[in-house]
């Protein structure tokens, strides 16, 4: 282990970090449960206020409240922005079948990997900075949001406004395997196609009907062709519904489509293609809803430079950091699309996001907290 003051302080605190993680995991916080989310927000606010951070609770009438925490710097230069979310995909009651537990060097439980362990990193990074009496060169804003898992519908504007005041952004989503940070992410789109036909008796006068499912079948083939694997664009018609009974020409059908794009140019192309859908069957009608709700995080020169600086800083802590890309989106997509240097994947190594085997590797907690603290000191 390198002789580094941050590691010297944090390594003996691994058990304390696990205990802090448990206190978060046992407070279940599904994305659409305002009562549960607000309870966890209160717990987090109190915890960080005790460390001397200025805490702003940002009311949210249609979901959980968000938190903005500020650690002041030596002057008023643009702050560093650290993004985390405290909502999970797991409903209240999941602890009954998937309790928090530690075994074989792993901590298991709902949301432990994605991404409550990252909230622990924020807490102990602040503790470490205070313990070694080092002042970061700029203020730090921690933004903890409550709706990332459902597309950040109420926090997106807040994230973008905060990013507009910031110098760079660190996103504490989990890393890729092999200690790789995320320097690129695909953008994410959600579309819904509604098809309207005309009902008729399928045996007596089918010619008087307009089969919405047949129209939908034509459209499924058309939409699937919008994909461009060479450009990194995927189009998945994942859900289709229609009809009432087998002896009625179906009058309505719908499809739900997932789209992933690697570049802003592809995002624009795909949105234009969906807007241009036209019926094939005479008399059928189409309505298309949705769009690209997370722009792609492209690996810009600014992001590449930020990663290179992080790689050098990480080496002083014994990390051999790599980089990679992923098809999933995060709130870092929003900040990168604004041109902010954004580095993602700074969370805790583990596996099983959104799965029953979700876990983190507990021994990595001190090192990852030290890495976050070192980045905030040196960037």
Image (cartoon, grey):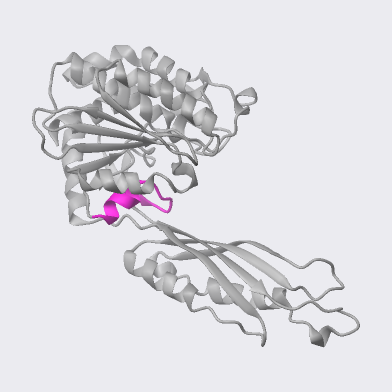
Q: Position of residue 98 (x, y in %)?
A: 60, 26
Pick the front one: 123 or 101: 123
Pick the front one: 231 or 22: 22
Can residue 91 be found in the magenta stretch? no
Can residue 328 be found in the magenta stretch? yes
Pick the front one: 51 or 109: 51
Tell me what residue is drawn at x 53 percent, y 29 percent: 35
Pick the front one: 200 or 136: 200
Q: Position of residue 352 (x, y in %)?
A: 51, 37
Q: Quadrant of residue 90?
A: top right
Tell me what residue is drawn at x 45 percent, y 35 percent: 114
Quarter of the picture holding the C terminus = top left
Left or right: 103 with respect to 175? Answer: right
Q: Is residue 194 visible?
A: yes
Left or right: 20 with respect to 167? Answer: right
Please, is residue 72 above or below residue 229 in the view?
Answer: above
In this picture, which residue range is highlighted in magenta? 324-338
Please, is residue 262 above or below residue 217 in the view?
Answer: above
């Amino acid at each position: 282990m390198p002789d580094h003051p941050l590691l010297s302080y944090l390594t003996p605190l691994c058990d304390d970090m696990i205990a802090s993680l448990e206190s978060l995991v046992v407070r279940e916080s599904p994305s659409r449960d305002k009562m549960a989310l607000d309870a966890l927000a209160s717990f987090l606010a109190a915890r960080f206020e005790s460390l001397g951070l200025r805490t702003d609770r940002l009311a949210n009438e249609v979901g959980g409240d968000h938190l903005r925490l500020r650690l002041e710097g030596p002057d008023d230069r643009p702050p560093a922005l650290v993004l985390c979310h405290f909502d999970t995909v797991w409903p209240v009651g999941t602890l009954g079948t998937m309790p928090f537990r530690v075994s074989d060097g792993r901590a298991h439980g709902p949301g432990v990997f994605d991404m409550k362990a990252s909230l622990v990193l924020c807490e102990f990074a602040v503790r470490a900075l205070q313990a070694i009496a080092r002042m970061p060169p700029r203020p730090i804003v921690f933004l903890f949001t409550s709706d990332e898992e459902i597309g950040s519908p109420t926090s997106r504007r807040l994230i973008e406004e905060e990013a507009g005041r910031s110098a760079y952004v660190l996103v504490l989503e989990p890393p890729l395997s092999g200690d790789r940070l995320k320097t690129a992410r695909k953008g994410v789109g959600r579309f819904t196609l509604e098809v309207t036909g005309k009902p008729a008796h399928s045996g007596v006068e089918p010619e008087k009907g307009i089969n919405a499912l047949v129209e939908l079948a034509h459209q499924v083939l058309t939409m699937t062709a919008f994909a461009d694997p060479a450009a990194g664009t995927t189009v998945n018609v994942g859900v289709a519904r229609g009809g009432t009974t087998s002896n009625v020409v179906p009058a309505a059908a719908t499809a739900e489509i997932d789209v992933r794009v690697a570049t802003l140019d592809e995002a624009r192309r795909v949105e234009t293609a969906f807007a241009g859908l036209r019926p094939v069957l005479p008399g059928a009608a189409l309505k298309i809803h949705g769009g690209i709700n997370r722009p792609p995080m492209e690996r810009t020169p600014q992001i590449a430079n930020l990663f290179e600086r992080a790689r050098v800083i990480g080496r002083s802590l014994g990390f051999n950091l790599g980089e990679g890309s992923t098809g999933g989106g995060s709130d870092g997509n929003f900040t990168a699309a604004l041109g902010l240097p954004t580095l993602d994947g700074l969370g805790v190594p583990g596996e099983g996001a959104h799965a029953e085997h979700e876990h983190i590797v507990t021994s990595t907690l001190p090192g990852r907290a030290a890495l976050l603290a070192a980045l905030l000191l040196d960037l």
